[in-house]
Structure formats: C-alpha cells, structure tokens
Amino acid sequence: MPSNFNTSTAYPLETCDIRLYLKEHPYLATLLPKTGVLFECDGDAPSPSKDYGQLQISIDKIILRWWKITLRNIEGAIYPGEIKTSFEDFYHDELAQREISRIFGQKTLEYCLNLVCGRFDWLSRLPLAIQIKIFSYLNLDDIPQVSLVSKLFRTICRHNDLWKIFYIHQHGRQTLENKNLLQLADKRGWRHVFFTNRLKLQIELRREAQLERYHPEDPSDLVKARERRKQLQPSPPVTPREQTTVRRHSTRKEPLPLRIGSARADVDSRTSSQTEH
C-alpha cells in the first residue's frame, strides 16, 4: 500500500455499529453465519516475500496474524505478530491496513474497509432461490458477462432453475404441458433445451416420444433388448491365442500304426510264423 494512502479521503464514510444495524434489520441478521464471522482468509504474501498471514473479521473486531518466514537461520530474531482491534480503530490504523495490503492485496483491503463501513455483499449471502429470482430479471446478453464476476455468479448463471425461467419467459408457460419436453429437460437440462434450435428439438422430442411409446415402463428396456440381441448372435471366431497349439513337424520317432494289408503287417506275420516252427 502506498505510504500516502489516507483513509479519510479514500473512505470518507464512518464506521458502522453492526450490532445496532442488525437489530434494526432482523431479516439481514439471519443471513449472517451463527459464528459471527463476516470474513476469513489466509495465505502467503506475494514473492519475494514468503510471509504467511491470517485475517478474521467478526461482528465487533478484526484479528490479523502474520508469521515472518525467511530462508536464513536466525534464532530468536523473528516473532509472529498479531493485531486485535475494533472497527473504528482499524479504520484509522495504517499499520494494520499496510500489512493486509502487503499479504493479501489491495482488493482484500478495500473489501475489509467496506465491511467496516457497513457495506456488506448481501447478494452473495441471500438464499439460492432469491438469487435465481434476481438473476432472472437480467438480460440474456448480460449473462455471460455476469458469470465472469465470481464463482458464485457463474454457478447461479448455469443453474437449471434459472434457465427454466428463461425458457418460460421466451416460449410461454404452456410449454410445460408437454410431457416429452419435461423429460428431455430432466435428462439434458433446461440450458440445453433453451439453446437447441427448433428443428433439432423436435427431433429429440420425437425420439423421447418413441421411447415412451415402445418402452413406457422402463426406458432401460432398450439396453436389455440390446444385450439379449448380443446373446442370440453366433459366437465370434476363436482368436489365435485361444486355439490349441499343434506341432506340424514332430522330431519324436514313433512306430507306425499297423494297417491291414500293409507291407509291415505282412513282415510281422511271417516272422511270427517262423518262430513258431
């Protein structure tokens, strides 16, 4: 943070008494966590520094801790630091603001000062149903830009219920009477149905209708029928690895089999008759 930074000029607002503010707005009090922690983060400082810091902002105080990390072997010269201060003291404490800016960055410091002044990010703390309702009033051309703001906004911009509202706004609520359309939306999502052109959507709806007509009970019957069809098909030919190995040229000398009428049989019969005489 620059040395000439002045909170009185950059943030002219006064600090906020959050407890009194929550008493005046009981519904907003329900949006805050029960632990009372409004913001919490930790991380390493950017290079070349390797210091580690931890920041916690509750309803009535701010706690900042940091640990000096160095590669040199210095015993007893570096100790961790901690600052516990109220909102009003933190608003005018340049040392604490300088440490937050050094470890976490200028944007984190600006966010902390906004919390101290009572400017909360209530949109990110609202229930999901209310967030989707608010986003449904956006123009479709603004959705890609809004989704780049944060991970939360990207999740909301891709939510299935939000695109269902967009589809109803464009095509009317009577489209929900189409049972095949609802089944396709449950399978593919309303965002897919919204961006699919009319011709391709009709083809997909026709396929869903045929699937329901021929297999009304269980759509997985198509898979079962395909498995039965594979079982009825003839078995494939045996692979060379599965065939039994046969030696074509044997080196083992085995006696020839006796055959009736062969020359070997005649010789054997003559020798046996001579031995008898």
Image: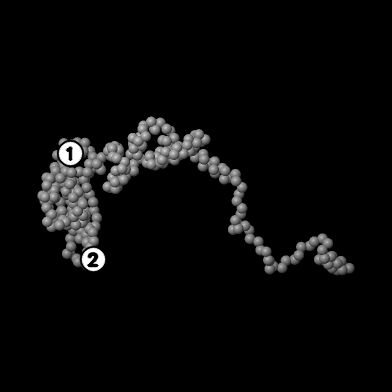
Residue 276, x across and y down, in percent:
87, 67
Residue 51's quadrant in the figure?
bottom left
Neighbourhood count class around disc 1 (C-alpha, 10 Å): few under 14, some 14–19, many 20 upward:
some
Identity of the residue drawn at 11% across and 53% down? 6
Residue 192, x across and y down, in percent:
39, 42
**Residue 160 seen in the figure:** yes
For the residue marked with disc 2, what is the amino acid?
A: Leu
Identity of the residue drawn at 40% across and 40% down? 193
The residue identified by callout 1 is: 22
Query: Disc 2 or 1, which lies upstream in sequence?
Result: 1
For the residue marked with disc 1, what is the amino acid?
A: Leu
In the figure, is residue 277 to the left or right of 118? right
Neighbourhood count class around disc 2 (C-alpha, 10 Å): few under 14, some 14–19, many 20 upward:
few
The residue identified by callout 2 is: 71
In the figure, is residue 219 to the left or right of 59? right
**Residue 127 seen in the figure:** no
In the figure, is residue 76 to the left or right of 251? left
Residue 28's quadrant in the figure?
top left
Identity of the residue drawn at 13% across and 42% down? 17
Describe the element under mark 1 as helix, strand or loop: helix
C-alpha gap between disc 2 and disc 1: 47 Å
Quarter placement of the C terminus? bottom right
Compared with 47, 200 (above or below) is above
Q: How is the image coloured?
A: one colour
Identity of the residue drawn at 22% across and 67% down? 72
Residue 270, x across and y down, in percent:
86, 67
Describe the element under mark 2 as helix, strand or loop: loop
Compared with 113, 173 (above or below) is above
The residue closer to the viewer here, 33 or 194, is 194
